[in-house]
Amino acid sequence: MVKKRTLFLLAGLIWSLAGGNVLKIGLQAYTNAFSVLNVGLTALVFFLFWTKVFRPLVGKHVIRIHGYEEEYKRPWNFFDKKSFLIMAFMMTFGITIRVMNLMPESFIAFFYTGLGTALAMAGILFLANYIGYDRKAVSEE
């Protein structure tokens, strides 16, 4: 069992690590696929994933974690079942795309760079909630 506050640390570390790994793959693909169009597409992918998926997801989980009545929870309680399923689907889909070469390197470059940046930002927001635990939830500002 861990303190509620620690759930933010766990979520932050996991999402930052995942985002960093996805971002690394995207940036490596950029070495052969750099273009102004891909940079613009990277910004679009980041914007869509950040505003429509990850920022709302972080906010939902911050509110849920703060709402726990018990001070100690299981370490995996930083997410609910639905979020773990989404994470598993995204990982499976991403690995399948790369292993089976289903998309060109230019797609990997812009999509993974934008997605990885958004994932890493989610991790950073969870970490900010860990650091500022006793203050107002960071995602609600």
Image (cartoon, rainbow, N blue to C red):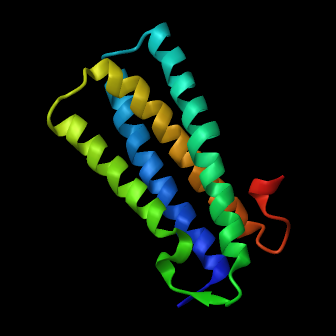
Q: Position of residue 11 (x, y in %)?
A: 54, 65
Total numbered labels: 0
Q: Please tell me which residue is depicted at 85% across the width and 69% down the height of the picture.
A: 135
For the residue pair 66 and 128, the one nearer the viewer reads as 66
Q: Position of residue 10 (x, y in %)?
A: 53, 70
Q: Please tell me which residue is depicted at 60% across the width and 39% down the height of the picture.
A: 52
Looking at the picture, does residue 114 appear above or below residue 56? above
Q: Residue furthest left?
A: 100
133 sits left or right of 102 in the view = right
13 sits left or right of 95 in the view = right
Q: Position of residue 84 (x, y in %)?
A: 42, 63
Looking at the picture, does residue 78 appear above or below residue 100? below
29 sits left or right of 81 in the view = left
Q: Residue furthest front?
A: 82
For the residue pair 82 and 48, the one nearer the viewer reads as 82
Q: Please tell me which residue is depicted at 66% across the width and 73% down the height of the picture.
A: 65
Q: Position of residue 95 (x, y in %)?
A: 25, 44
